[in-house]
Image (cartoon, helix red, strand yellow):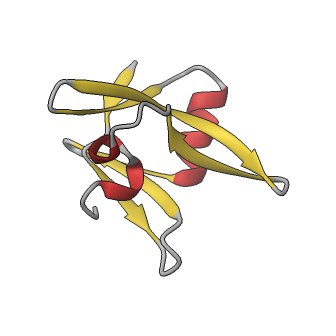
Amino acid sequence: MSLQVTRSQKNSDGDITGLCGSGWTHSKSQAIRNITADSSAYYVSVAGRTVYVRVRTRNGADYLTTSADGYAPNNLDDLPDC
């Protein structure tokens, strides 16, 4: 199942802590579990530019990001808050 992300939750440091769409909210850990288990795909689509949400690891910790396409409005950091 693919879910469109329209908003993101961020902590005071600006780190993504959750994803939100029409009628649903998933925590970061829930989204990571869904992506790694291939049970859900998340995507962001702004002005016809669509990218998928990916799980990456930095310093041993998983985090959520979008595929790089050079278009800032479809980045999780740039989405409105949930």
Q: In this figure, what is the number of numbered marks?
A: 0
Q: Residue at x 66, y 29 (%)?
A: 36
In this view, the residue in front, 74 or 62, is: 74
Q: Residue at x 48, y 25 (%)?
A: 40
Q: Residue at x 50, y 31 (%)?
A: 67
Residue 34: quadrant of the picture: top right
Q: Residue furthest front?
A: 70
In this view, the residue in front, 19 or 44, is: 44
Q: Residue furthest bottom?
A: 12
Query: Residue 78 location, x and y as percent?
Result: 32, 56
Task: Indicate left or right for 12 with 76 as reference.
Answer: right
Q: Does 71 sit above or below residue 82?
A: above
Query: Residue 52 location, x and y as percent?
Result: 44, 28
Residue 21: quadrant of the picture: top left
Q: Does 19 sit above or below residue 40?
A: below
Query: Residue 44 location, x and y as percent?
Result: 32, 34
Q: Residue furthest right?
A: 60
Look at the image and tell me in which quarter the C terminus lies: bottom left
Q: Residue at x 28, y 54 (%)?
A: 79
In this view, the residue in front, 41 or 51, is: 51
In this view, the residue in front, 5 or 40, is: 5
Query: Residue 74 location, x and y as percent?
Result: 31, 41
